[in-house]
Amino acid sequence: KRKNMNTETNIPPQAEREIDLLELAGRLWVKRRFILCVTAVFMVLGLLAGVFGAKEYAASCQIVPQTSRSGSSSSMARLASLAGINMGNMTSNEQVLSPLVYPNVMASVAFQRELLQTPINVAGEAGPVTLLSYLSDEKHRRFSLAGFVLKYTIGLPGLVMRAIKGEPEEREMPQSDIIVLSREERLAMRQLKNIIGMEVEEKKGYITIVARMPEAFAAAQVAESALTLLQRYITEFKIDKVKRNLDFIQGRYDELKREYEDIQMIRARYRDANQNTSTSRARTELEKLDNQYNLAYGIFSEMATQLEQAKIQVKETTPVLTVISPVAMPVKPSKPRKMMLLAAFTFLGLVAGSGYVLVRPMVAEFLGSMRDEERKRKEGNA
């Protein structure tokens, strides 16, 4: 008898798992109609989200950043040597801005603030409006079923916290170089993260800029503006040092040019005034002016050479973004993806229905045990 009891109680764990799985499968089979009804409801919601969801158009362009300057540097040095200019080590050890930094440039406050001033053409407006006005004005926001559901489900805690804290008060700030964002700019920059993006394909060697907007032409305008701004920002970062060097040399060149021209005019006037004079004093004064003229001319010529070198360096240092796929107005919307939404909602419906069938008995058993314990406790107290 003891042996029979052991054989009855010592059931292998694998057999227990098989029994549990068979039991769960049996529950699902019994409630299959309920699960199918829940799945069908979710499929209808997926169809509605795909049909009535807000459309989104994606405009993109592909660019190849400049990564090596050795060939162009040697070519520029050879051309400069033909003109009698020694470039020396001016083109050596140049640092090229890494393409991995480009997303940080695009995410900077200064870049986004300037991008928000992009004029775009949208439906319902007689003329172009800025991207800032488009994103901050409530009338341009379109209803999205999926966005509405997410806002008041997953995003509900954030809404409650913002309602409790409230918006920070706008205060007048003193004039300074520090960037101070307005409330509209802050709200627009939050949305801008979902509008403009960049993908760096380091292995393939190109960069993709993507702009997503509810209207096709507006998306193309934002992508083109982002490309133009990126080219300008990268150029400014790269040539800042050589540009400041050029400005310094240009200022010194203008100063030496004026001094050279003044000495040249003084020397010419003295020659005209003393053409028939052959005194030693006149010759000494003329030699003195000639020496000053030759010295000024030598310094001026050297500075002119340095000026040309600085100009060549600025042009040679300017980075180039080669556009291999220009911005084009999209024809078909990229979102909503109807088949993907339908598949996702169908899967969610299947999971929700099955989960309800499997979890409900466990919850009922747990609540029943709680009630039994409460009843026993009351009886014990009585």
Image: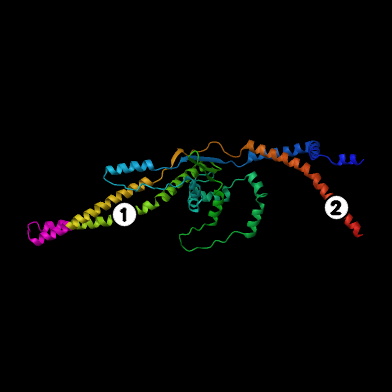
Q: Which residue is mark 2?
A: 371
The label on residue 249 is 1
**Residue 273, position as x, y percentages in the image:** 11, 58
Residue occupying image coordinates x 65% and y 47%: 150
Q: Is residue 136 something one can see in this rendering?
A: no
Of 214 and 43, which appears nearest the observer?
43
Characterize the magenta stretch by its predominant secondary structure: helix
- Is 265 left or right of 197, judged from the image as shown? left
**Residue 227, position as x, y percentages in the image:** 46, 44
Say if 351 sits above or below 310 in the image: above
What segment is highlighted magenta in the picture? 266-290
Work out whether mark 2 precedes mark 1 in sequence or the reverse, and give the earlier one. 1
Secondary structure found at label 1: helix
Residue occupying image coordinates x 33% and y 43%: 76
What coloring was used for the rendering? rainbow
- Is 68 left or right of 289, judged from the image as shown? right
